[in-house]
Amino acid sequence: MDSIISRKDVHAQLEKIGSADILVGIPSYNNARTIGHVVRAVQAGLAKYFPDRKAVLVNSDGGSTDGTIDVVNQAGIEDFQSILLYHRVEPFFKIVTPYIGLPGKGSAFRSIFEIAVALNVKACAVVDSDLRSIAPEWIELLIKPVLDGGFDYVAPLYHRHKYDGTITNSIVYPLTRALYGKRVRQPIGGDFGFSGRLAAFYLSKDVWQTDIARYGIDIWMTTEAIANDFKVAQSFLGAKIHDPKDPGADLSAMLAQVTGSAFGLMETYKDVWKGVHGSESVPTFGFRYTVGLEQVNANVERMLAIFHAGLKDLRQIWLEVLGAGDLGEVESLKTRSDRDFRFPIRLWTRIVYDYALAYHKRKLPHGHLLKSLTPLYLGKTASFVMEAADMGQDEAEGEIEKLCLEFESSKEHLYNNWK
Amino acid sequence: MEEFIQLILEPMKEVFVKFKEFAPNLLAMMTIILVGILFARIMKAVLLRFMKAIKLDTWSDRMGLTAVMRKGDLWAKPSEAVGSLVFWTLIIVSLMFGLSSLKIHAIDSLVAQFILYLPRAFSAVLILVFGYIIAGFIGRAVLIAAVNSGYHYAKLLAEAIRLLLTVLILAMALEQLQVAPGIVVAAFSIIFGGIVLALAISFGVGGIDAARRMIEKEEERKQEKKDIEHM
């Protein structure tokens, strides 16, 4: 398969740069509105916290048509004194290139890994291009644990609205924590720091024609780092605020790509997770503070309508996946009124494990199986939104903790049925 | 008297001579059929073991083929049904070969026609089997996608698509078997075209309100506060 460094323009830039200490990657696709701010924050972060290090910014673009690339090329800090920087700053290089491969974030990351390996960098970070809340400190928090602390992987830790990140909160975090025993709170956060060694390790894997080349990249990076015993930490970055996602983005496809990647990794690392019991916290960096968060709208009525439609029309598929017992419990939920609708965490845990088992046993074509989880997931999300309506942030976090403990204590169900 | 006896013996002699000429052919036919039966039994046993090894019954359950067999009042296991189908096909083939060894002109031409028809029958069976699997796959994909996007008539839509595909597949199989091909093509065009037209009209007329609601909802969503983020 083609490599980004075989492109003439990229190759010429790499030859010119030679090698670097730090690389910050920004994957993008039509983010002209926000990427300028991200580039300036990265440049300020590098200048402020790593003034004596040679640094490269790589924008790996998916063929934007809104002038994203021009914005990246033009963006930069002209007056360093305005951000109170008076010291000498090492030259700052920019590589702006369209990536090669399947359209998706994973392919963009692959190009970033290739450039990182070619430049023999010591530490890398990747940040989303639609961030509004990124500050120069993010670069320090993602890079410094790698450069000075000897860590290989730094996951982000954010303050998010209690309703946000529901795929993370109800599936990915509890599942990853129960399987691999590390409490990485945002395993699919999107902004990560990692060592050059880990970038080379990622690049050695042949996964670029799968869902990992799309939304599955985040969970894949986190799982690979944990399962292969790389030193993992997390850094508190504050609030994560970004441009609203495209409302047309297909939730079902996102969910399928993320869960499919997580379930696929369970096959690869079955010997690892089978030996893990309980979980432990990972070193956490950054000064924790409270931040104000944007109000979030949650359309519970629509979520429940899709859940009930699933109960009516997907019964046969759910029976195949969940079995009569668990399906009976799910069906008993339909007798409750929308206001009293609650999804028991024990049942939800078994559903996720049943789906992982069905994926492993290939009970249905993977695409159908994973997409049939959407109505159940929306039922669970609607239940959480109603439960947490009057809760503060900490209380809501407490509910997620309860779910994680349920995932850990029910792991035996997964273990015993994995043949 | 002698002449009379001769008159009786002559046809008997002729029959005996003809039988003497015919006997080896008859023996050959019986041998071919017996060997055919033996071969068919062995093949069935081997096939059953193979299908058990590859877990055909489980796969068939999963793909919904078993359910279709049950609807058609076939209660044997799918592997046994395939075994029996192969067994009887081999029996019929050996019977045809056996009959052709009799070297009777009428039977020879019948056997030739049968053998020429075999590839068509085989293709038709393949079209039906694969067509059924593909129709089921697409029908299920449509059902899941429609449910996930909150479409009210998800099951109806999925069934309609499955029906359209089934009609298409049946027409293809019949065309392959050359069963009144002209009528099949005309009937298919009328039925398929009719269904599509009916769907277009019903969606067009019945969907005006739904389309309006969707557009209004989209507008409302744009004006609403920040929506929940799943990732």
Image (cartoon, coloured by chain):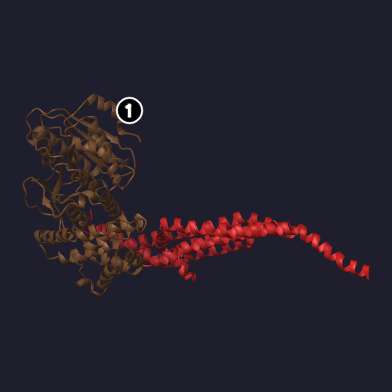
Chain colours: A brown, B red
- Horizontal side of A124 relative to B188 (left or right) equals left
The local secondary structure at tag 1 comes to: helix
**Residue B212 x/y as whole percent:** 36, 64
Tell which subunit mark 1 falls on. A
How many discs appear?
Answer: 1
Could you say where residue A208 lies in the image, as x and y percent from the top left? Answer: 31, 42
Q: Along the horizontal axis of the image, is A302 left or right of B111? A: left
Q: Is residue B222 visible?
A: yes
Quadrant of residue A374 within the rendered picture: bottom left
Q: Is residue A301 above or below residue A233?
A: below
Question: Which of the 4 quarters of the picture holds residue A76?
Answer: top left
- Residue named by callout 1: A8
Q: Nearer the viewer, residue A230 or A306?
A: A230
Q: Residues within 10 Å of mark 1 (few under 14, many from 20)?
A: few
- Amino acid type at image mark 1: Lys
Residue B89 percent coordinates (x, y): 58, 60
Q: Residue at x 81, y 63 (%)?
A: B15
* Residue A382, image quadrant: bottom left
Res. B175 visible in picture? no
Q: Position of residue A32 (x, y in %)?
A: 25, 42
Q: Quadrant of the N terminus of chain B?
A: bottom right
Q: Nearer the viewer, residue B12 or A50?
A: B12
**Drawn side of residue A164 relative to residue B195, left or right:** left
Q: Is residue A292 above or below residue B214?
A: above
